[in-house]
Image (spheres, rainbow, N blue to C red):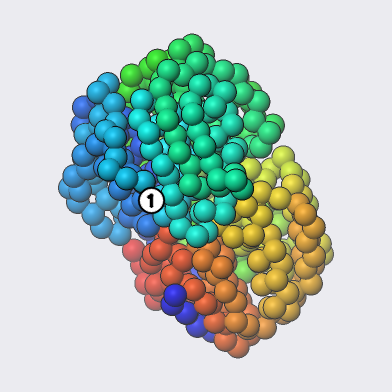
Amino acid sequence: MSDVILEHAGAGLVGELRLPTDKSISHRAVLLAAQAEGESFLIGVLDSADVRSTMAAVEALGASINRVHGDERGMQLKVRGWGEAGPAQPAGPIDCGNSGTTARLLAGVLAGWPVDVTLTGDGSLSQRPMERVAAPLRLMGAHVETSAAGTLPMRIRGGGLTAITYESPVASAQVKSAVLLAGVRADGVTSVIEPRTSRDHTERMLPVFGAPVERDGLTASVTGPAPLKAAQVIVPADPSSAAFIMAAATVLPGSKVLLPNVGLNPTRIGFVDVLKEMGARITLKDLPAMGNESVGTIVVQTAQQLTGVTVPAAAVPALIDEVPVLALVATQASGRTRFEGVGELRVKESDRLEAVRAGLEALGAPVEAGEDWLEVHGPTTLTGATLHSADDHRLAMTWAVAGLIASGETCVEGFDAVDVSYPAFHTDLTGLLGGGAEG
């Protein structure tokens, strides 16, 4: 694992930055195109380790992927799906790498077909809970086995599904998506009822491939069987990646950054509302939609003053991936910032809740954490420290931003965890210092 050393920034972030494309949408575009009849054209698919896990998985199942073009703004792919012929029986287990999205959504896809597939993953993914998707898929009629601990490896023997109405105990887009993807192959109306709204990219994309989705409050439904047809998908820039640049620009004096073509799906940009409530200067300029996804340009400038806020549990599903960097911003805000209902952070790529608490404490910030809450008190002058990513891309990026805020040097160990979602993050972040780079 690589280490990166960052020093206190002597200037703000200035310029325009084209961010990597959206990881969540990229996964779903590849998965739906792989199931569709015909050849789909996907524009701007994120070139990252996680998305490549999904690409390799569907190729092992018989889909054909032709990379037409690729640059820093993503890959252009032609994907010929297996259609009504169904997926091929793979030669062996499918390795999902570090990608929880690959494992959980693919389980939903496979549940509807008469194949026998085992999903595996790396050490981190193999510790993450899989029963949350296995349980509803069993209710639909699939045979799903997980380890004794309810984790990978997960074996799915699918086919012959019956529609269900499932009340999910967690607000999880991955659980909801797995059930809806299985519902595409089930007889009848499959509905998922969530306790709170989670990101809705699957509900937005299924109709693009010919499977209408009904939504009523916290309930999403699909009527099956619904054969998928090839489509074109354009993937916008990733708002979660934008969050780290926005956080740095908010706290570093003299900053003004423009981020074009960023996805503004309301279920993904809760962090923008929190930053603005704290006092961040953020402007959103709407652009024409990309398919069923809202898109816009984000302009962020240095905040004149930041104030602590309370983030209630109901708001957390729309900003769960951004809690670490929001907690970092909170160290520079006056008063207390409290995050409630964030226990889901304990079962991400790492125990993010404990890692954030320990990391901020190492930087000198007053911070406390409980089983499902986090409190940060500020403002605090941070001091450089040695911090480990815990092989978690969101932590690696958070600690890199911390390195620009803290005095002295900050060493981020295991920094190449960023390859999961934003391989060029260090180059892009430091390239904006003092307006040193654009594009």
Location of residue 304 in the rendering, given as x and y in whole percent from the top left corner = 67, 66
Please name whichever residue, 301 or 247, is drawn nearer the observer in this view of the structure.
247
Answer yes or no: is residue 285 visible: no
Q: Is residue 291 left or right of residue 71?
A: right
Please name whichever residue, 337 or 198, is drawn nearer the observer in this view of the structure.
198
Q: Is residue 317 left or right of residue 392?
A: right
Looking at the image, the residue that sits furthest to the bottom is 408
Location of residue 68 in the rendering, given as x and y in whole percent from the top left corner = 17, 47
Q: Quadrant of residue 133?
A: top right
Q: Relative to 232, does residue 255 appear above or below in the rendering?
A: below
Location of residue 272 in the rendering, given as x and y in whole percent from the top left corner = 60, 50
Query: Residue at coordinates 48% horizontally, 47% vertically from top-left?
Result: 153
Looking at the image, the residue that sits furthest to the top is 188
Residue count near mark 1 (Cα–Cα under 10 Å), binned few <14, some 14–19, many ≥20 = many
Report which residue position mark 1 lands on. 95
Q: Quadrant of residue 25?
A: top left
Please name whichever residue, 240 or 154, is drawn nearer the observer in this view of the structure.
154
Q: Is residue 9 left or right of residue 170?
A: left
**Circle 1 SS class:** strand
Query: Residue at coordinates 80% horizontally, 65% vertically from top-left?
Result: 368
Query: Residue at coordinates 57% horizontally, 51% vertically from top-left?
Result: 128
